[in-house]
Structures are given as structure tokens and as C-alpha cells.
Amino acid sequence: MINKVRFGPSGNQKLFYEQGHKHSIEAPAWLRSLGLDAYEFSFGRGFTIKEDTAIKIGEEAKKNDVLISCHAPYYINLANPDSTMIEKSFGYITRGLTLLDCFGGVDYVVHIGSCGKLSRQEALCNIKTNLKNLLIILKNGDFLRGGKRLCLETMGKPQQIGTYEEIIDLCTLDECLVPTFDFGHINALTGGSLKGYDDYKKILDLAISKLGERAKSCHIHFSKIEYKDKGEIRHLNYDDEIYGPDFAPLAKVIKDLNLTPTIICESKDNMATDSLILKEIYEST
Ligand SMILES: [Zn+2]
């Protein structure tokens, strides 16, 4: 399932509804008709979907060869020193993995945490300890059945844990941990550093050298993102000409390194049609 490059949107674009569709159950067939084969379902603001609905969407996804991934709630924070809050974060992860299983998906995207009042070093230390404890729970409870992966995301604001180096390092803790490279976030956090082929390649080379084969089928988020000196401000559509980053050099790196990532487009409005643009750029590379 994760042995080929896949493209798809996060959520349903307006166009989906404008074309008469009413429910996400219809999304996989719609994406397939456009030529897309991935679909990310977000629990960012909570779990609103029921298990039987997730199963129905999952059946449609399987029929249409669309691979579903899920995005965990934004309020997970494995750096939090409060053990009650950590228990809650663990619950958001086990709940999400259960729903991901209903969807028949593999990848669960997680924002791992932020510093709050802690130093960066303390926050990272808490995250490592909590991740190790979480992995014991996930393995004992068989939450990772079917080869599921926790895809730790690179983040766009300085207070958040999630530079690409930090994410790659955290992923060395276990085979089930894989980076979600959000290149819009990386670009925003570093003031627009992703300019060409080498800027992307050094990140993916580092991941492959530290994580081996599983880095080749990493999860990717791609959208242009507005930023200032304090990092990410807002997601844009791919037609933005100011902020970047551009997909073309990344497409070439993906081809040259024989990578098979799932590439999810998180454009502001045009996430499905921009996904198609990314796919066309990749295919013409
Ligand atoms: Zn995210």
C-alpha cells in the first residue's frame, strides 16, 4: 500500500460539494475520478466521526485504491509535564488509531508537542520518555496492527517541537515512527530556505541515513505557506507566487532517490485540484 507515490488532499475541497456530493463516503470515488489516490481525514479539532461511518468510507477507499491517512487532534502534547494531560494525549492517539483501523489506513499524523514553559531540551526529554511509554501501550494493545505508523510532523513555529532534525531523531526510537515532512512548515520556520534541489535532498538524505528504508515511504504534507520571522502564518493555494516552496525540485529528488511517499496537499482551498497540479509536476519530471 505504501510502495508507490500517492497524491491526495486533506479534507474535502469546496468543488466536491459544488459538484453535488454530500458526504465523505463519496470522496474516494470522486478522488479516483480526478486521478488521485490518497485522502487525509483530520481529527484536528476532535473526533466527530463514528466508527461505522469510518468503515463505510474505508470500504469505498479500498474499492477505489485510495489510501486513507488520519491527522491526530492538534492539542496532543507529549512534552507536557502533567501526567493527567499525558494520559489524555495517549487517549487521543489510541482513539485515532482505532478509527484509522476502521478506515483501513496506515499513517497517523501527529504534532508531537511544544515547549510551553519548558526549555527545548526539557521538552524533548519529556517527549522521548512519553513516546517510549506510549509505544508500549500501542504494542500491548495491538493498536499498530496492519503495519500502522505514527508519522511525526515537522512544524512551522519556533515554540513547537518539530524541526526536521528533531523529527528524524525522534523517529529513530522505533520502527513504527516515520516522519511527516511538511515542507511548507520547514520553509516557513527557516524563513524560506527551501529554494532548490539540494535544500530538499539534504533533508531526505539525512532521513534515509538515520532511518533506512522506512524513510523512503515517508509521509509528506505539501502546501505553500505564508510566514514571518516567527514562522508559519497561514496556508495558501499553490498559485501563490510569493512564499513558496516550489514542488518541482522536490519531485526531482523523489524520483532520483526512488522514494514512495504519500503526498497530502493542504492548500487553503484547492487541496484536491492542487494535488493534481503536484501530481502533474511529478509525472512530467
Ligand atoms: Zn499537521
Image (tube, rainbow, N blue to C red):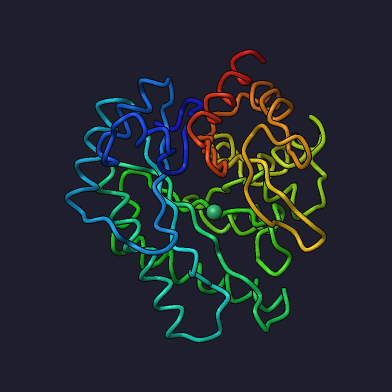
Residue at left offset 40%, top offset 78%: 87
Could you say where residue 16 lies in the image, as x and y percent from the top left? 37, 33
Residue at left offset 57%, top offset 41%: 267
262 or 22: nearer the eye? 22
Query: Is 23 situated above or below 45?
Result: above
Residue at left offset 59%, top offset 76%: 126
Is residue 208 shown left or right of residue 194? Answer: left
Could you say where residue 55 lies in the image, as x and y percent from the top left? 20, 44
**Image quarter in which the C terminus is found:** top right
Seen from this angle, which residue lies furthest top?
Answer: 284
**Image quarter in which the N terminus is found:** top left
Is residue 218 shown left or right of residue 36? Answer: right
Could you say where residue 165 lies in the image, as x and y percent from the top left? 72, 54
Is residue 121 shown left or right of residue 222? Answer: right
- Count of labels shown? 0
Query: Is 252 situated above or below 78?
Result: above
Query: Is 39 situated above or below 115?
Result: above
Q: Quadrant of ligand 1?
A: bottom right
